[in-house]
Image (cartoon, rainbow, N blue to C red):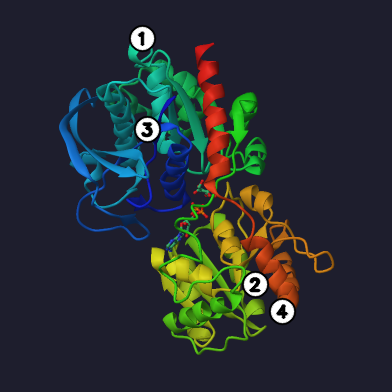
Amino acid sequence: MRVILASSEVVPYSKTGGLADVAGALPKALARIGCDISVVTPRYTGLGKRHGDVVHHETGELLFQDLRVPFAGGVKYASVWRDWQAGAPIYFIDNAEYFGHGYIYGSGNFDVERFAFFSRAVLELAKRLGAAPDLIHCNDWQTGFIPAYLATVYAQDSYFARTATLFTIHNLAYQGFFDPNLLPKFGFGWDAYEYGMEFHNSACSMKAGLYYATALSTVSPKYAQEIQTPEFGNNLDGLLRWRSGDLLGILNGVDYGEWNPETDTHLAANYGPHNLDAKLACKRDLLERYHLPVNLERPVVAIVSRLTSQKGIDLIIDAIWRILETDAYFILLGSGTDSYESYFQHVRDTAPNRVGVYFGFSTPLSHQVEAGADMFLMPSSYEPCGLNQMYSLKYGTVPLVRGVGGLDDTIHNFERTTGQGNGYKFYEYSADRLAEKYYEALLVYYDQDSWRKLQRNGMQADHSWERAAHEYVGAYQRVIAARRR
Ligand code: ADP
Ligand code: GLC
């Protein structure tokens, strides 16, 4: 089984969010269980760097400079680079016109054009590599054009006669809308628009993926259900209900090679479930990094997040003073919407001895926050999977979440009487419910034996990618068989 995974971001080369973590870790886990997996991603170059992006330019060896990509009424060329991660090749599509601007995502129609070009380049690269893939695993709207190209432009191309596609939704809210007048430029006919891409008089590459892929998946079982409802369906719930027989929910995993407090090189001290006292050294280090006076008795409540409404930032803002009144520290690492940043700056200026903020993107600091905090907030309005709550579990940092999507699948309320559970969750989208759960957690925080039990429950659970990799291989086999029928 030959599989190509296409993603617009891949750790450790590029990242704006969890998609990069998944596209970095899943292929390694697949390679370890014997799947022939290659990854294809853009090579982002150019000066400057956008807020919230991580981009590394060291991307292995240059393979060739003359990949021909039919596009924009002619042929455009790309260079192709290759690197390796744990036995899996990563191919980089290098084209300065589209990926040489120093950012991962820019804005508007140009982004759609960039990723339409990328999608077509993935197919041309697959042909150039000389062994037809059995399956192309596409991820989010940036790769929604791949199934559409295969079903239309390449429909008569015998090279892909047996190639199936799996389209994974990481976030249904980002849909890749564009002006339908661009379709000829991308090489599509009006048929493709009418059937597979038209969406409220606009064209939509997310819809293209959902419509044309052989099968669909998303990143948690709960989100797979939710997106079939109007509340979470972003107006695509009808299409998703129509395809519900082809839609799977496979929970993401954690790359414990990167995220393990026993081996993490970013930390002031390493610790595990059996020497939790060493976590205090990380707490001290974190408070010092944020220039806060050190009092290790007080709880540290933290978030590491894109600052967008998805992440329930409004609830945190509404509950922040109630949290601070309990003598807690509040620590934030994140970037995003300006109004959120300025509000948290105001909170920091009002309570400078209790609040620390860092607006930016820092991978080492994200590890240090996970290790140094006592509680981690994720009151998301929706959450396809969420990775930080699973990182928190491993780091003995108690997650307090809203029960949506992958958060509902992974976090279970702790009951002091039974000693069962790994965190705290509430359902109603309300700051009062968040505050109530926080007070409940706080009582347990001051009962050290129960808190230790709660921390260890989370630390000892196994959320490794191995389980998910086996689920994906099973899914790939079924999707390939479906295509051949
Ligand atoms: P999403 O993909 O919706 O942003 P996830 O929880 O799946 O949410 O993944 C977010 C990833 O991005 C995590 O690895 C998290 O640590 C990382 N991250 C988010 N914001 C920052 C930041 N400001 N600095 C460093 N890492 C961040
Ligand atoms: C998206 C989702 C997040 C998920 C990530 C990786 O960015 O918002 O919930 O964990 O993709 O699948």
Q: Which residue is mark 2?
A: 319
Which residue type does callout 2 highlight?
A: Ala
Residue bearing the label numbered 4: 448
Residue 109 visible at all = no
- Judged by depth in the image, the label closer to the viewer, 4 or 3, is 4
Tell whether circle 1 marks a residue whose Cβ is less than 8 angstroms from ligand 2: no
Q: Which residue is tagged 1?
A: 156
Left or right of residue 185, residue 266 in this image: right
**Where residue 477 sits in the image (x, y, percent)?**
53, 24
Decide which of tag 4 and tag 3 comes sooner along the chain: 3
Real-space CA distance between mark 2 and mark 4, rounded to the nearest whole angstrom: 25 Å
58 over 276 or under it: above or below = above
Q: Is mark 2 within 8 Å of ligand 1?
A: no
- Mark 4 is surrounded, within 10 Å at the Cα level, by few (under 14), some (14 to 19) or many (20 or more) other residues, namely few
Q: Secondary structure at mark 2?
A: helix
Res 416 → quadrant: bottom right
**In the drawing, what numbered circle is on residue 179?**
3
Residue mark closest to the camera, 3 vs 1: 1
On the rendered image, what quadrant is the C terminus found in? Answer: top right
Three-letter amino acid code at the position of disc 3: Asp
Residues at marks 3 and 2 touching, judged by CB atoms closer than 8 Å: no
Q: Nearer the viewer, residue 316 or 10?
A: 10
